[in-house]
Amino acid sequence: MSQRPYVIDQLISAKAIAARIESLAREIEAEFSDTNKLVVVGLLRGSFVFIADLVRELDLPIEVDFLEASSYGDGMESSREVRILKDLRGAIEGRDVLVVEDIIDTGHTMYHVHHLLESRSPARMKTIALLDKPTRREVDFKSDWTGFAIPDEFVVGYGIDYAQRNRNLPFIGKVRFTETA
Ligand code: IMP
Ligand code: MG
């Protein structure tokens, strides 16, 4: 797929992300200090870097599982229709669950995933998103923890892609097109 030329401007440094994850980890440890049956569920593919850093900060006995939901395709607009492409490997009934997402935009993905997982009767379910674009919300969904609220910009890096590229950048950057369409 051919792309309009763009550059990436840094929005959140790797250092700022690491510091924020440290403080979020302390809050998550406090919430789940009473359990030894926590499953940390990463939403593929965008959360893979975040979940890797987050779980290494957590001083808790955890398991890790992954779920893949589709919404975007290769474009910049959410399709609003959420499909499960890869389900969890394990059952979550009676377990404590922390769902880890890269970014909440319209809210459709997390709304859908939250309802799906609730229907499996976990003991307790909490959500964390590294990034949130609150001004873009179309359905009512509020994450229990958020790393950073950001303006309505298309971002990449730290696991997050534009047309599958830039996931390997160590920081969060915003995409700026260098030619008008
Ligand atoms: P939502 O369903 O509209 O909330 O979209 C959530 C999903 O869209 C996220 O899991 C991301 O994969 C993707 N997404 C939302 N905003 C961005 C962005 O700025 N850059 C890249 N992907 C994004
Ligand atoms: Mg995603």
Image (tube, rainbow, N blue to C red):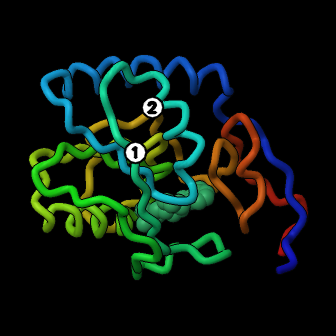
Which of disc 1 and disc 2 is earlier in sequence? 2
Q: Residue at x 46, y 76 (%)?
A: 85
Q: Nearer the viewer, mark 2 or mark 1?
A: 1
Q: Is mark 1 within 8 Å of ligand 2?
A: no
Residue 171 sits above or below residue 167 on the image: above
Q: Residue at x 10, y 60 (%)?
A: 121
The residue singled out by tag 1 in the image is 64
Q: Secondary structure at mark 2?
A: helix
Residue 3 sits above or below residue 105 on the image: below
Where residue 109 sits: x, y (%)?
A: 38, 66
Left or right of 22 on screen, residue 91: left
Q: Quadrant of the N terminus?
A: bottom right
Where residue 67 sits: x, y (%)?
A: 42, 62
Which label number is shown at residue 55? 2
Q: How many marks?
A: 2
Question: Which of the pair 17/176 is nearer the observer?
Answer: 17
Q: Amino acid at mark 1?
A: Val
Left or right of 76 on screen, residue 152: left
Q: Amino acid at mark 2?
A: Val
Left or right of 144 on screen, residue 64: right
Crowding at dot 2, Cα within 10 Å, few <14 / some 14-19 / many 20+, comes out as some
Q: Secondary structure at mark 1?
A: strand
Residue 58 sits above or below residue 75 on the image: above
Q: Are discs 2 and 1 less than 8 Å apart at CB?
A: yes
Q: Quadrant of the C terminus?
A: bottom right
Q: Residue at x 61, y 52 (%)?
A: 153
C-alpha gap between disc 2 and disc 1: 9 Å
Where residue 86 sits: x, y (%)?
A: 45, 72
Where residue 30 sits: x, y (%)?
A: 22, 19
